[in-house]
Image: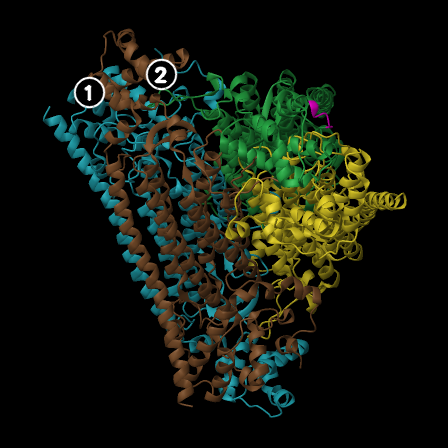
Chain colours: A brown, B cyan, C green, D yellow
Amino acid sequence: MSDLDVLRGGRLAGALDETLQFTSSVSDDRILANAVRKINIVHLLMLLKKGLIKKKDAMACIEVLDSMPEDFPLNVELEDVHMNIEAYVSSKAGDDSGGQMNLGKSRNDQVATAIRMVSRERLLELLDEIIVLERTLLEIAKANTDMVFPAYTHLQRAQVVTLSHYFLAYHDAIARDLERLMECYSRVNASPMGAGAVATVILDLDREYVAHLLGFAGILENSVDAVTARDFLIEILSLLSLLMTDVERFANEIILWSSSEFSFIEIPDEFASTSSIMPQKKNAVVAEVIRSKSSIIFGDLAASIHMMKSLPLGYNLDYQDMTPKLWEGLKNARASVRILGKMLKKTVFKKDQIEKGIGDEMGAADLANYLSVDSDIPFRKAHHIVGLLVRSAIEKNESFRKTVTENLGKTAERIIGKELHIDPAKLDLILDPHKNVESKKTRGGPSPAESLRMISDRWERISSYSSLVNGKREMIEISEKALQNEIKNLKEVK
Amino acid sequence: MSDLDVLRGGRLAGALDETLQFTSSVSDDRILANAVRKINIVHLLMLLKKGLIKKKDAMACIEVLDSMPEDFPLNVELEDVHMNIEAYVSSKAGDDSGGQMNLGKSRNDQVATAIRMVSRERLLELLDEIIVLERTLLEIAKANTDMVFPAYTHLQRAQVVTLSHYFLAYHDAIARDLERLMECYSRVNASPMGAGAVATVILDLDREYVAHLLGFAGILENSVDAVTARDFLIEILSLLSLLMTDVERFANEIILWSSSEFSFIEIPDEFASTSSIMPQKKNAVVAEVIRSKSSIIFGDLAASIHMMKSLPLGYNLDYQDMTPKLWEGLKNARASVRILGKMLKKTVFKKDQIEKGIGDEMGAADLANYLSVDSDIPFRKAHHIVGLLVRSAIEKNESFRKTVTENLGKTAERIIGKELHIDPAKLDLILDPHKNVESKKTRGGPSPAESLRMISDRWERISSYSSLVNGKREMIEISEKALQNEIKNLKEVK
Amino acid sequence: MSDLDVLRGGRLAGALDETLQFTSSVSDDRILANAVRKINIVHLLMLLKKGLIKKKDAMACIEVLDSMPEDFPLNVELEDVHMNIEAYVSSKAGDDSGGQMNLGKSRNDQVATAIRMVSRERLLELLDEIIVLERTLLEIAKANTDMVFPAYTHLQRAQVVTLSHYFLAYHDAIARDLERLMECYSRVNASPMGAGAVATVILDLDREYVAHLLGFAGILENSVDAVTARDFLIEILSLLSLLMTDVERFANEIILWSSSEFSFIEIPDEFASTSSIMPQKKNAVVAEVIRSKSSIIFGDLAASIHMMKSLPLGYNLDYQDMTPKLWEGLKNARASVRILGKMLKKTVFKKDQIEKGIGDEMGAADLANYLSVDSDIPFRKAHHIVGLLVRSAIEKNESFRKTVTENLGKTAERIIGKELHIDPAKLDLILDPHKNVESKKTRGGPSPAESLRMISDRWERISSYSSLVNGKREMIEISEKALQNEIKNLKEVK
Amino acid sequence: MSDLDVLRGGRLAGALDETLQFTSSVSDDRILANAVRKINIVHLLMLLKKGLIKKKDAMACIEVLDSMPEDFPLNVELEDVHMNIEAYVSSKAGDDSGGQMNLGKSRNDQVATAIRMVSRERLLELLDEIIVLERTLLEIAKANTDMVFPAYTHLQRAQVVTLSHYFLAYHDAIARDLERLMECYSRVNASPMGAGAVATVILDLDREYVAHLLGFAGILENSVDAVTARDFLIEILSLLSLLMTDVERFANEIILWSSSEFSFIEIPDEFASTSSIMPQKKNAVVAEVIRSKSSIIFGDLAASIHMMKSLPLGYNLDYQDMTPKLWEGLKNARASVRILGKMLKKTVFKKDQIEKGIGDEMGAADLANYLSVDSDIPFRKAHHIVGLLVRSAIEKNESFRKTVTENLGKTAERIIGKELHIDPAKLDLILDPHKNVESKKTRGGPSPAESLRMISDRWERISSYSSLVNGKREMIEISEKALQNEIKNLKEVK
């Protein structure tokens, strides 16, 4: 009886080679192999504990599984990793022992469990990288509380902030991405094992024991739900897409800033490329690829939502094509987050060029607010007066400060019927970018003191997130040790 | 000076009518009007508290705002709801008072705050409906713990469960949707007010006071982030898309079940339609429209992620076109959840027809598991024997039970070289659907006892979620009362 | 018998108000009303011609239909425009005549036909606007064959072209969009009428006569396909999304060019907006909204593909929710194309600022090519030498031309072991942007002469496209007249 | 000088390994290698023809290129296939000759050309498969003009057609997909070569000669457009997504039909799989995977549109990540189309089971139409009468024919005040499914004669499409021979 016949012989005539190639998941299954291996061990331990198999069969299988090489052969004819592992174990431990491996379980609960185990690991790796990126952003923010920086709206220079303040904005956005992924983790970290094909099995299983030894926080209870649920997969891809929206916007600004028109930054050579025909070029290729990875993840999200549409409950083979999209997404997100941080760390912000971009008209809104309060005129009027002064400065191509100094009085008279005056020192406080920024002490504002407060606050927050991530990883490691202990005990009592 | 000139006069020449039509958000802004009204009141109270405006101006504006009719005129020439409200108040309270309304704030922080306030309300309404749907599912589950039901994989009948168990599966999926939306709420419920255009303002504001009176749990701190962040919007649409994936799958099964081939259910007439040309038709149109609403929400999600791509930080007008997609999504999701529950409540499950669909071969997997343990043979062999018996039953077009009874012995002999026997009473326990289901007592399995346990557990969980939702609503109502008190105090001390 | 009962009475008990609200298409159907009106007239004429109804009934209905006001009442209880029109005609012409209107047809073929008729019109309007935009682009190209302009790769200045050449690039991309939409038109312009509900009807109809009088080029033959097919709708949305990708990229460049860092253009005031708090701002809001409209169209495409997934052949109510997305897409695309052209027409390109952005290092690639051929050295070596010279110029912060003049010899010696020389006049020809551009006479290159040739070629091509579009419109008008003639004849022979 | 230094040495310091891994396209470039090889040969021939390089250099490179093994080494450090080929040729032919390979061209025009060449081939292969599928559908249609089949609307049995008619519906939908892909081919089949990096080159090239020898129908003229345009790629993915919408709907119906509830078909064993735990299962896994491949293609489309958003003209590295999505799409679409046809060819339609599903109430609409004309009563009344009869038949659980025979008279009297009668032979003609179908002779209807006419018409149409596809393939082969001739001539004149 050939391997394939083991699987199909009972019910179906031979399969077409083309069918196997088209429907087999073997090429995408290597990534699941280690998790499936572990699940099999734990499942066997549970069967033994419940008295459902003989110790010698459990031992024989577990010994093979425990020393199974990572590159054990995966045969496309056997459809997937599950059947391949059974065939591998049977070939080493004999058909009688190997033939027990799928007693009381199904590929349906097993694959769902394995995907969750790998997702868990990849999520923790991603969380680590996000934490590193956040710390990098805070370090740069800390070193640049005094570097004024133009904030834009509609890509038009709007008001002055600092580089520190700007980086804190990106930090805070990405911190929400981290928070979302942390919350999602708890939905990933539940064990479907024991749900069987869809309705549990007729044997008396101990699902909690399996879940515990596999490091899960609990079980995914309802058996139909347990084999059906792929919402965690779409949720992860949604959150990756949200994360990458932030990361990609940052990348796009880096491209903008490194254009010769902006010229705000110098990207380190090792993150840039040149052209084979235009030797003067220095292209922000890393940032461009971050941008395209974001699109790939979005496509993966779209594909997975589309795949799920109108599927009845229970396992459908469509699910199989979702999983590689999840791995693609996690890999691309992690690589993007990682390289963005590394690049930023070495990016030079060109202070002179950046300051050149900050005209004193960027204080216009502040001037309007100040005049309204100080001179006791309606804000809308103050706004109008300042608007006219800006327009006049642009038309005369002179500095806004000069125009204000010379024309505030008569412009105000024209609009509100009375002259307005402003103390030159006060005007300087508003229009000088450094002083302007310093005076914005409202909570969440760009003043250096406020930035330092926010940095220190976020630094602590990251530390506690980092502890949480480590805690989750330790929980897996502890279960890993518990599992090794069970195996050891089993062998010793032999 | 025309209304429009108030806004543009200082800086720009006249706008084209076509430009206004193309870029104005007025037609989508009515939904924000009440929130913007409230924000203006609270902002004025704060300015007064900080001594930045005169009491008479604050009073004049607040009185107009407090009694502003819901259908106050929205003029497209004034671009958006913000300028319209200033114009309205100015027309009633005079330019001097009305002209103070935008002191110390911007449309950028204001619109972000208003969208969050409306989102909050709509989310709570949606959460209410989900809770109602969950309770409906549990009620149906409770009433049907004994009704056997076929569970499918690959749309092929797989194993027997109960209607109760099946409804619990949908319940549990939707419960995760609820959980996600609850978590998201906390990211929505933070106030951007005080961030100004992008860099806060030069005046000394009290952002916490504003946040508190608007019922927010806190402020969205960094000012650049506060006016930029639309991740909450995409997050909501992502979660709605996830929710609708579950709701729509249910709808699709209803369409399937109501086909004459399945004929599992009778949809109540009031949720169906007939045909203008084929009078015998009874179409599950409500379920079809639920399915299409899910697609619309997915499109809204795709649009909003696409819109966000590569936008620099700070406000960009692109954001404006995201907001109506959010309202569309929230409305469609709520209507779908609501009508699904109502329809299910009145749907009749046709016991006879459903039971007809459950052949005794659906116990085949259980038989294989049982034989393996009971007769002490490898599961794979038992699986093979049972597979041959199923094939034989199909070929002879006779019942599986008959084939097993007559042929188990010799088939086993052919495969494993020894006869196997099974006690008829035991066979009945496995192949009779009701007994089969009762014997599956593993946690999360379909036995009626286990269903009842799960129903009671979930019933409690829903209650605590319901309390949480009510708590969130009360927090808004309390702040509303606090606001009314502040207004009253203001008037009294007059 | 109430209106609703006419429709449902035979088969179903009363419908729930909420069901009607949820499933009715009335609010989206107004746009189809005129097409449905015409279809009814033509269908009645055909029934009469085939002797299937009496002349008095046909006449009575046609007279009502012919004078039906555009804002005739649409009652949500009657589900859709089809039933509303029957009810309206019956109320005017009596139940006996009105009751004949749906003899031999169905809502399924009728709605598919109506959507195609409206799509046809909207497509022609869009094609008109694209042609206008293309002509605008060519006019600007024609006026600017001498204005040098930086071409970018990776948003880094790469090589010199002209504004003319750049606009021709956008023209050519949009011309392909036009071509695609023209091809699509022929798939839209086929009549489903006569397909009935799904299987044609038992009466002997004349489908070609109906198609002809409705201005279609032919019929959509197979009846199941005719009522099912919505591929034309998704195809249109796909092509709109492609079109908008081009239009939106242009809009994004306009936003970039109007930033103060680029400062390449001055957008006319009537296409910009200012800020309520920052009076110095002039925002390219029209371009931003074009960008977001592109995203909305993409979302509509995603929604419609998602909606179609896994639907069985035949009409499904899901289709109903696709149609408004089509109208939204066509409307947004047309408005975007139209306003982009108008804005470009008035946009001022700031020659001085643009030329400032063109350094002589943009000729570096050309220099490498020239040196390789002229000095007979491998291109890769020439590329290396020029690369070193660019690097040196940047490091010394001096002009590339100066560096080349002074250092070409010794740099070459270092790399290839022999000195290289270049004639200063030749160097000028390569590094001076105007001369550089003039010398690029390869077909499709930026030389003014080549641009003029391309402009003239495309101008003719547009004219022939314009004739094709007009031809399609005339075909509809001719059928319209033929229809009026038939009605007139009918009345006269009375 | 290392390979990498050849490329970067002139301008940039060393690149980071991680950067190379992140931005290199080498792993995706193998598929382009042969096209790039050919482009290099043709480009060298053109340079030689124009007198821009020496014969010995051209010869040396061409000889290496002509015999380059398919699996020549691709080094990730060299970024992409273009630099790898130059490095390979240089290592064989010497730096002096190899160093000439990129004279007068750029990676930007080269990669765009190569992608178009590979797309061309893959499109032709796909077109071949679609033609095979169409022929299969017609063959099945031809063999089944007499097999009645239920047509559904809203997944409710609506009217009787034949299997032939139903397959023709799918045929016609897929024929439009073919038509679209054919039209798209002409937009793919244009050569960007000669556009250089973005602005052509300063040398005098012969773009038409290159295009001709590479088998293109012409050149993509404007140089900026030529290196920028990826609309062909998105267009292909759009059309694949449309195609797969049809293919996937078919697959979904196959899953439905093979459920035990429908039981319309028996899928051949070689296209099905069984379950590892439920031996009675026979799952339509091929159809499920077709469904998921459709989603993957949709995701690839979404990703590519998203990637394109807001990119400035000229090459951006983002484009690089689009190309693998195109190959993935073309491969999945081709495999799906191919296996669907193969599976259908062997699928057995179970006549008895299908006919069982066709009740005589499916002739109700026809009866209403017939009664209206025959008895001269308004259709709406006839519709109402028939509706009541259907309801009555359902309530009494008796055949529709019996109810009509017994109750038509009095039901009519109740509704229209007069009795109606129908000749039993006529009634049989309407309600007997075979006779019903035969009598529907309207063009596009289900009568066997009409089906045969449509099959024959489409058979011819496919033949002419097949000739067109072959013609396109021959054009490439002819250019291939012309190229071999040029190489041969070159060597002979040596």
Residue highlighted by disc 1: B57
Residues at marks 1 and 2, common chain? no
- Tag 1 subunit: B
Q: Nearer the viewer, residue D365 or C458?
A: C458
Q: What kind of element bears circle 1? A: helix
Label 1, residues with CA under 10 Å away: few <14, some 14-19, many ≥20: many
Residue D313 position in % (x across, y down): 59, 32
- Tag 2 subunit: A
Q: What kind of element bears circle 2? A: loop
Label 2, residues with CA under 10 Å away: few <14, some 14-19, many ≥20: some
Residue D146 position in % (x across, y down): 77, 56
Q: Is residue A454 above or below residue D337?
A: above
Residue A109 position in % (x across, y down): 48, 69
Q: CA distance from mark 1 to mark 2?
A: 34 Å
Residue highlighted by disc 2: A399
Amino acid type at mark 1: Asp
Q: Nearer the viewer, residue C224 or A436?
A: A436
Q: Check the picture and name the quadrant holding the C terminus of chain D.
A: top right
Q: Is residue C9 left or right of residue A191?
A: right
Whether D90 is among the magenta residues is no
Q: Is residue C207 left or right of residue B229?
A: right
Q: Which residues are magenta?
A: C439-443
Amino acid type at mark 2: Ser
Q: Is residue C363 left or right of residue A51?
A: right
